[in-house]
Amino acid sequence: MAGVSVGMPVIGATRSLVPGAAGTTFPIERLGIPAIVFADGPAGLRIDPTRDFYSKTYYCTHFPIGISLSSTWDTESVYQIGKAIGEEVRDYGVDILLAPGNNLMRNPLCGRNFEYYSEDPLLSGYIAAAYINGVQSNGVGTSIKHFAFNNQETKRMGNDARMTQRTARELYLRPFEIAIHNSAPWTVMSSYNKINGTFTAESYELLTTILRNEWEYEGAVVTDWFGGKDRVANVNAGNDMIQPGLPSDTDIIMAAVEDGRIMPQTLDANVKRILQLIVKTPRFNGYVYNDEPDLSTHAEVARKVAAEGTVLLKNDDVLPLSHSTKNVAVYGVTSYDIIPGGSGSGTVNRPYTISLIEGLRNNGYNADKKLMEQYSAHLKQFRKEQEAAKTDWWRSEERAKELLFTIQQLSLDADNNDVAIITIGRISGEGVDRDSVEFYLNTNEVELINNVCTAFHMKKKKVVVLLNIGDVIETASWKNLPDAILVPWHCGQEGGNSMADVLSGHSTSSGCLPMTFPIDVADHYSSQNMVMNAPNITLGVGQKDEDQGIRNIDYTIYEEGIYVGYRYFDTFSKEVSYPFGYGLSYTTFEYKDVEINRADDKIYIDITITNSGFLPGKEVVQIFTKAPKSKLDKPSRELKAFAKTTELQPSEHQRLRLTINVMDLASFDQNEQAWVMDGGRYHFYISSATKGTQFTETLKIKKSKQAVNDVFKQR
């Protein structure tokens, strides 16, 4: 969250430094301590593109969103995105980027899933670490967020997440632990919500016992903007910095030091960590920023990685489009008005957005002109009607309704074109969860897909559906209709180009799902404790923390425990539309020469991957494990390692090594108050994204445990 106007003086106003940034620290000029600048966000730097009395613009690159990055399953690609974002952060005079978002995708209806990474903590953690390392390679910092348990937007400033310690540690803390240990973010942002009755921003157990004492985190902790209610509790819990800060906060903290509610050494530690943060920043070190980042190069990075994160769900001999394909009938308002990212602090003030039409043209295709004229008129009328409507900055914007066409026109379209492409779009954003209705196609969308498929198939022509979405939607009821389904997600300002690159085969299809596509949203275990029809809960400063006792609004019971996403669907043999980790390719791969070895606290799995098909491609290797029988309930399988090949030409091979920390096989036992790795034989499933399990290896491991602190007592 950033840019909140509260109608009162706020410490750290940014107009004189970087307009549109989220906040600053307070400068102390007599001591040579400058203000440092914080700015959003996950999909690219968010600052104002124009400034008073300047003709120059200050646009930033809108990169693919988090869900697109995790779909690459490629830490090197994500590192390159982070590096490019960090260059813009540095060159525009910002010191700390308020990103990445690393909360788990507990349920498909969370409004902010688009900027998170996965339903799996390991995938989330390593993708976040790669992003952080990329950004911070430029000498600027990040703020990993929202620590922790921010898994819904409905009443996010007061919702009480109620769960067992095992649930907290195995799922919701694990992505942060992995990211922090593998990247050392400069700051951690505490979240708005509560954990078992205590605001996370006021939780000593979370911010000190776990973060600092157990994980040995040495950076600074900053509140989310206006997070928490009690400033004394904020400080005592372990927040070093309250953002954006009100003048009254200083008086409250000083009074608490004087009357003993805050110990001087606590405040000293806060100040020390803030100063340690400041002296690392470009602004303190006199970096002369130029306000001229290399936007053209960054656009190319965005285009390449967006294609890499595109997931191919279905392909009945149509993709990549043949060299003879030239004329394309393009349907769906989103084809002409693509969605580059979600709304709220995760958006970017970008210089342009490439539509699918433009992307197809750039790849040598001709889009049907009559359809272009019809959609142009439709969108022009829609925008005219929307001009007078006011939308809060964090709200998801309205989308134009789908156009419908007569069978006669569709039949003519099929005569005049080689293939049909339909784009379905969904947008979500900060502050509001998705309504369950948005999970399903609406009547117009269903009719459009049905009619286009009928008309084109009658003429022996193919139909491709693109899903320009920020989270899961329902596919089971209609996926048999089109010949191919591609999920490019919200893929940034170069979206039209990256979509067309994959359609044409100029970029290889290698993305995999970072979450499960269920048959129905209610199939998720967590849906029993999630608002299905998101209420209009106002977001903003001063939101009252009145506990009305309304389930899933004032409090949410994490009744599903560790059975989130594929851990639930697999363990309880519940059918899905597309499984976690799934993604087709334009080529095929052969797995061979598997070796598994243990050396001290590491397990090494070596495997040779060969491109056995006829087109270039990249393969994602996924290692799942199954633990021996235990007194604890455990999922039937859990992801423990993954790797992606480089682009392999036909017949080319690559030897991969995947590494698993032995203690990562442990589960949390609340009775023993420890991470416990049961002794016995562990199964290792070496899986292909396209074909499932290729090899099963076993390894016998002795029992061991690692004690930790007792935290998060349930109410």
Image (cartoon, helix red, strand yellow):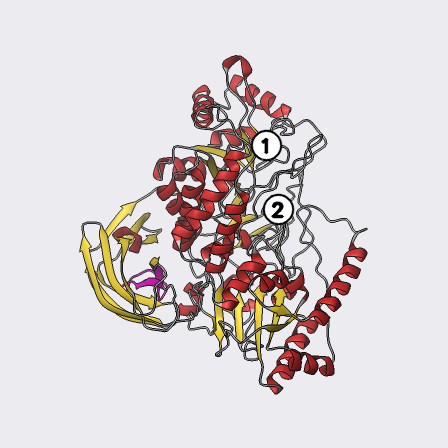
Query: Which quadrant is the N terminus positioned in?
Result: top right
* Structural distance between the alpha carbons of marks 2 and 1: 20 Å
Q: Amino acid at mark 2?
A: Arg
| Residue 499 sits above or below residue 256 on the image | below
Q: Viewed as shown, does residue 86 lie left or right of 417? A: left
The magenta-colored residue range is 620-641
Which residue position holds label 1? 23
Residue 36: x %, y % from top left? 53, 27
Q: Viewed as shown, does residue 199 lie left or right of 710? A: right
- Label 2: few (<14), some or many (≥20) within 10 Å? many
The reply to whether dot 2 and dot 1 touch (C-beta < 8 Å) is no
| Residue 241 sits above or below residue 155 on the image | above
Residue displayed at 71% across by 31% down: 52
Farthest residue in the bottom direction?
458
Q: Secondary structure at mark 2?
A: loop
Which residue position holds label 2? 350
Residue displayed at 68% across by 78% down: 413
| Residue 708 sits above or below residue 376 on the image | above
Residue displayed at 58% across by 43% down: 60
- Label 1: few (<14), some or many (≥20) within 10 Å? many
Farthest residue in the top direction?
30
Residue 592: x %, y % from top left? 24, 69
Q: Is residue 486 visible?
A: yes
Q: Is residue 109 visible?
A: no
